Image: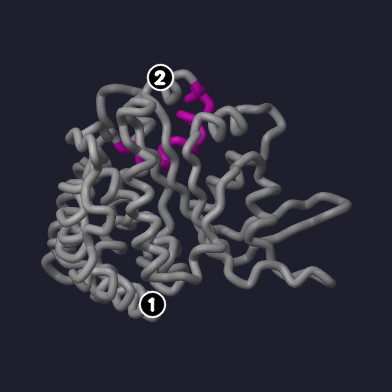
Amino acid sequence: HELLGEIVNRIAPHTEADPIAILTQLLVSFGAAVGRGAWFTVEATRHHGNEYMCLVGDSARGRKGSSWDHVRRLILTADPSLEPRVLTGLSSGEGVIHSVRDPTGQDPGISDQRLLVIEPEFASVLRASSREISTLSPTLRSGWDGRPLAILTRTAPARASTAHISIIGHITQHELRRHTTTLELSNGYINRVLLIACRLQRLLPEGGDPDPLASTGLQRLLAAALKQARRTGQVRLDPDARELWHHAYRQLAAQPSDGIVAQITARAEAHVIRLALIYTLTDGQSQIGTAHLTAALALQD
């Protein structure tokens, strides 16, 4: 759709990576860069543009890393201030909160509580989350929800009031099946993660254009959209999109007959509205239109 679609279409012929891998990582990165300056309200809950997403593909042939390299250069060109907030190494809930902590006493804390976590070995995150005393899963679940995060230890309590956490993970199909436990399926951890299948698209023995967006002006447009998005505030559905959403919501809420699919897609409605929000912000708009909602529904599908 629009700006993001143009960017992906320009990059796609010059990489072996899947266009869907480029698109989804760009969506998540843009939502991370926006921070908490834009949101969509459902009842008393604010949905911001922070998303969790994991690319699922063959180990080397999925070209997951190649797709991220393009997105990383693009988003950090649009927003250099995001670079120190792009981290890796999810291992504990305490570590996550420490990376976005509020100031306390002599500790100045972290002034920029945006956090974009890149995990090229997402299987290690699933392993860490499954440990009996691990605080990683509940912390990440609260982070996706946008709730305040806290560690109530006697020696080193920590709190993050306005954390804006986004995650991009890479995993193989085998690892995903092996390390996804019944607990993670049932406790809402996995259904907070968009699982995106990706595969090798073409063979480029000598690679493609190393900078396919040069002289297109698309980076400048993305930076301008990002700057405007941070000042947007509450985003609403326009009348046509509202009518479409009421119809789509009933379909998304219908439980699939396959129990595992039902557990994985239990938050489809929330994912769609967050994706529609990000699409809207990349267009520089303050109302979700039918095009934004249709694009989000297509990606969820």
**Amino acid bearing label 2:** His
- For image coordinates 56% across by 58% down, the residue present is 147
Q: Which residue corresponds to mark 1? A: 233
**Residue 88 % position (x, y):** 56, 47
Q: Which residue corresponds to mark 2? A: 174
Residue nearest the viewer, comparing 288 with 262: 288
Image-based side of 1 in relation to 263, left or right: left
Please determine whether, in this image, residue 75 is positioned above or below residue 94.
Answer: below
**Residue 299 % position (x, y):** 22, 46
User: Is residue 57 magenta-colored?
Assistant: no
First to last magenta residue range: 179-196
**Residue 262 % position (x, y):** 33, 30
- For image coordinates 25% across by 74% down, the residue present is 221
The secondary element bearing badge 1 is classed as strand
Mark 1 Cα-neighbour bin, 10 Å: few <14, some 14–19, many ≥20:
some
The answer to whether residue 131 shows anywhere in this view is: yes
Label located before the other in sequence (1 or 2): 2
